[in-house]
Amino acid sequence: MLDEVITSSGMKKPVLAGWSYGTRVVCDYLTKYGDSHIGGINFVGSAVSSDPTFRGPVSGYTVGVLSDDLVQSVKATREFDCSCFHTPLSEADLDQLTAISMMVASKIRQWMNRPVFYEESLKAIRVPMLVTHGVEDQIVLLSLAEYVLKTVPRAQASFYENVGHSVFWEAPSRFNRELAAFIQKAN
């Protein structure tokens, strides 16, 4: 699907930025097509491994988030969404985020929990790569970002102190500035 978007839009060497599960979408693309048609990659709060040692303490919410029981799923999704932030969200923002999260059907959520093996795809990356990660991330531990940095020789790190899984929300000015600079450098 990502290849269709790139091809049909006429993009030339786009920089792919994936957050959390979106990094798996980028890796699925890389596994099938390689990186010859893209200019760079930004992994934000990368979730490119099924290895439980890289999961934060909120991984226990997964069962509830994946549940077909709506009451259980809403409660667990709200807890999960809360855990995406080091600085707590306002109730209004949390309500909106939970509503948006609940728009994804439980069957899709269950599929998203699939095991993944991307090490070979990561090792094959030759384009510039930025690995952005909140030091206080409770969803995906910083050790996964460090693993990506070791696996992808060209990757550079940008770690955010006092920020959780949602770096673009908690530190938008820095995040936008760094992503813009990375895009300029990659092209």
Image (cartoon, rainbow, N blue to C red):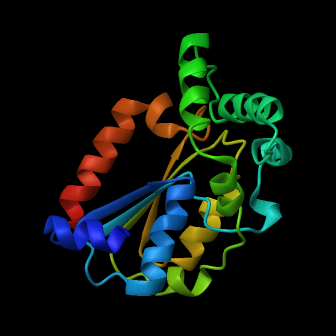
Which percent across, then down, holds residue 15? 28, 63
Figure quadrant of residue 10: bottom left
Give the residue drawn at x 72%, y 57%. 110
Which percent across, then down, holds residue 128? 34, 71
Image-based side of 85 in relation to 10, left or right: right
Is 157 placed above or below 125 here? above
Closer to the camera in the image, 107 or 158: 107
Please, which residue is most extreme toward the top here?
91
Closer to the camera in the image, 157 or 40: 40
From this viewpoint, is residue 128 visible? no
Image-based side of 112 in relation to 14, left or right: right
Which percent across, then down, holds residue 163? 58, 34
From this viewpoint, is residue 171 visible? yes
Closer to the camera in the image, 47 or 158: 47
Figure quadrant of residue 89: top right
Is 145 placed above or below 97 here? below
Is 132 placed above or below 147 here? above
Which percent across, then down, holds residue 34? 38, 85
User: What is the count of numbered marks?
Assistant: 0
Give the residue drawn at x 28%, y 84%. 36
Pick the quarter of the image with the C terminus: bottom left
Pick the quarter of the image with the N terminus: bottom left
Give the residue drawn at x 51%, y 62%. 23
Give the residue drawn at x 63%, y 55%. 108
